[in-house]
Every structure is written in structure tokens, then in C-alpha cells.
Amino acid sequence: MSSKGTKVIARNKKATHDYHIEETFEAGIVLTGTEIKSIRQGRVNLQDAYARVDRGEVWIVGMHISPFEQGNRFNVDPTRTRKLLLHKKEISKLIGQTKMKGLTLIPLNVHLRSGFAKVDLGLARGKKLYDKRHTAAKRDAQREIQRRLKEQNQ
């Protein structure tokens, strides 16, 4: 991929299964030198990660970045809380949405854009069990339709 393009490193596959995503935001991540090297190698895990707003700043909690193999003493805690970089207007909007409407901030994916690590945050509402069943049934019906159309065309 070109140096100006976007390359997705890690996805949070459970996010769309467990939550209704209402809005997305792109945020930069404050990292150390060895962490960005691990991200470029694709050694990131977003499972069980979430973001929170604290004192006007947004933090990502539970994102696991594996230690860089050649990093030795410069490696930091893989699951440390990391600061996210957003515009002040976006942060104030997130504060209002998470406090008033009871929404959650979920990381959807980590990607590289122009050499910088970014995370897409989803403003999400949790799905109930019946919502998950409905989504699965809809997906299965769609697959069945596609399969039948493919059989007809052959």
C-alpha cells in the first residue's frame, strides 16, 4: 500500500455483533517508539477494549499491543491506558452522548494513515439478546438469497 493510503491493522469483530454503532470518530493514539513498531507488525488486539472520557481527555483501556521483540528495556506495559487525540468539539460531543444517552465508546479498528496509527471509535448502544438473534437471522436469510441466485445463474 502507498505511504499516503490507509492500511487496517486490527479489527474488533465483536463490536458490530454486540453493539449498534450510531456514529464513528477517528482518533490518533499517543504511543511510544516500540509500540508503533509492534502496530506496524500487526501485533494489536482490540478484544475487550473500550474508551472512556476522563477530565476532558479520551483514553483507550484494554487495547493490547504486544511488546516489540527488539525493544528490550524500552518496551512498556502491553495493556496500559493510552491517550487518544481528538478535537475539543468532538470530545465535548462524546461527553454529552456518553453521559446523557448512556452510549459506550468502542474501538472498531486500528489503522495506519500516512504513517500514523489511528483508531476508529464507535459511539455504540449495547444489543439485547433478541437483537443479536434478529441480526443473525437476517444475515442467514441474505446468505440463502445469494446462494439461490448463484444457483440460478449457473
Image (tube, rainbow, N blue to C red):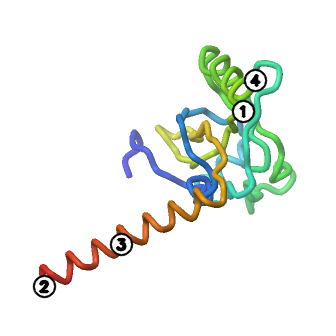
Name of the residue lying farthest toward the left: 153
Sequence order check, earlier mark of 2 and 1: 1
**The one of 30 and 22 positioned closer to us in this rendering:** 22
Name of the residue lying farthest toward the front: 130
Question: Callout 1: helix, strand or loop?
Answer: loop
Sequence order check, earlier mark of 3 and 2: 3
Sequence order check, earlier mark of 4 and 1: 4
Q: Residue at x 71, y 43 (%)?
A: 33
Residue hosting label 2: 154
Residue hosting label 3: 143
| Mark 2 to mark 1 CA distance (whole Å) | 50 Å
Evaluate if marks 2 and 1 touch, with contact meaning CB atoms under 8 Å apart.
no
What x and y, as percent, mark residue 6?
A: 43, 45
Nearer mark to the viewer, of 2 and 1: 1
Check disc 3 and give the amino acid type: Arg
Residue hosting label 4: 57
